[in-house]
Amino acid sequence: MNAIQLMSTRQVADRLRVSEASVRRWSDRGVLPVQRVGRRGERRFKPEDVDGFALASRANPPLALARIDRPQVLISGRAVPISTHIATLYDSDGARLRLTVPFLADGLRAGQPCFLIAQGAELDSYMTALRSIPGVDVDGAIASGLLTIAGAPGSTVEAAIAYWEENLWDAVENHAPVVRAVGEMVSERETFESEQEMLDYEAAINLTLKRFPTVVICQYDVRKFSGQAVLAALRAHPDILDVSLGLLLK
């Protein structure tokens, strides 16, 4: 096979819907065959190796989970498996916090990295609630990096996926048994280029999250999203089929 038939790192990342950083890590670790070409030793990949890698990834446990014990994670007393990505719907300020604040607090007490994607009034409500819970040092968790707060992971699908790829690889390489995240989608919509771009990201991120030890809750305030947007959000979260309606509807 000549060089023009080989795929670049960017082309592989596009085909697998991951970041270029993940492709480089997999090739460096020998799990994705790579060739080096040219004076700069640039990475090139055979299409059949890339397709075989994609099939193997779907058939076997996620690569980033292979070295990690898989603890149970509880959401409102219900055990959910690692690599769960669900959407929850709420219609009051109090309901926003019912599942997610205990979920984050449990993670911080256990020393598990937590991400809170929120801004404005939504973020303020979380900070107030978390600071009221005994045994949770919110400011210390932020200072140490145990709790990361961001308004949104990015303004485009590509930027948002790259944000999670970088942060989740860092967590895995630091031996985090699980990473918890809560995303307030009203807040995230403010940063994405459009609501549709945000919903496209919600669908695309599933493939990334399945490769890492994550449990992610995306929250939709039904007072601020149209019925069409809520339906699209539910379609973007197939894991909701495996959880009870009590978690979905608050």
Image (tube, helix red, strand yellow):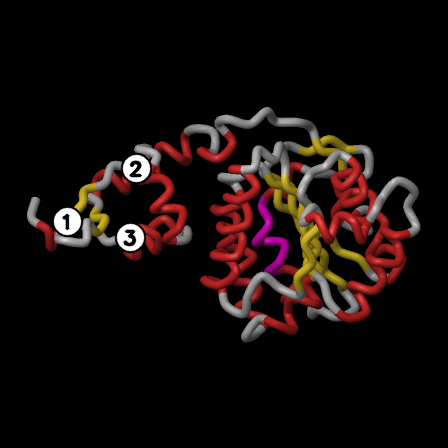
Quadrant holding the N terminus: top left
Say the numbered circle drawn on residue 32: 2
The residue type indicated by label 3 comes to Thr
Residue hosting label 1: 37
Badge 3, how many Cα within 10 Å: few under 14, some, many 20+? many
Residue 106 quadrant? top right
Reply yes or no: does residue 236 show up in magenta: yes
Label 2 sits on a secondary structure element that is loop
Q: Nearer the viewer, mark 1 or mark 2?
A: 1
- Along the viewing direction, whichever of 163 and 50 lies nearer the viewer: 163
The residue type indicated by label 2 comes to Leu
Boundaries of the magenta span: 232-238
- How far across and how far down the image is residue 61, in percent? 47, 29
Q: Residue at x 52, y 55 (%)?
A: 203
Q: Residue at x 13, y 53 (%)?
A: 39
Left or right of 203, for residue 46:
left
Label 3 sits on a secondary structure element that is helix
Residue hosting label 3: 9
Task: Of the two numbered discs 2 and 3 on the same chain, state the one appearing first in sequence.
Answer: 3
Task: Of the two numbered discs 1 and 2 on the same chain, state the one appearing first in sequence.
Answer: 2
> What count of labels does the image hold?
3
Report the predominant secondary structure element of the magenta stretch. helix
Badge 2, how many Cα within 10 Å: few under 14, some, many 20+? some
Does residue 111 show up?
yes
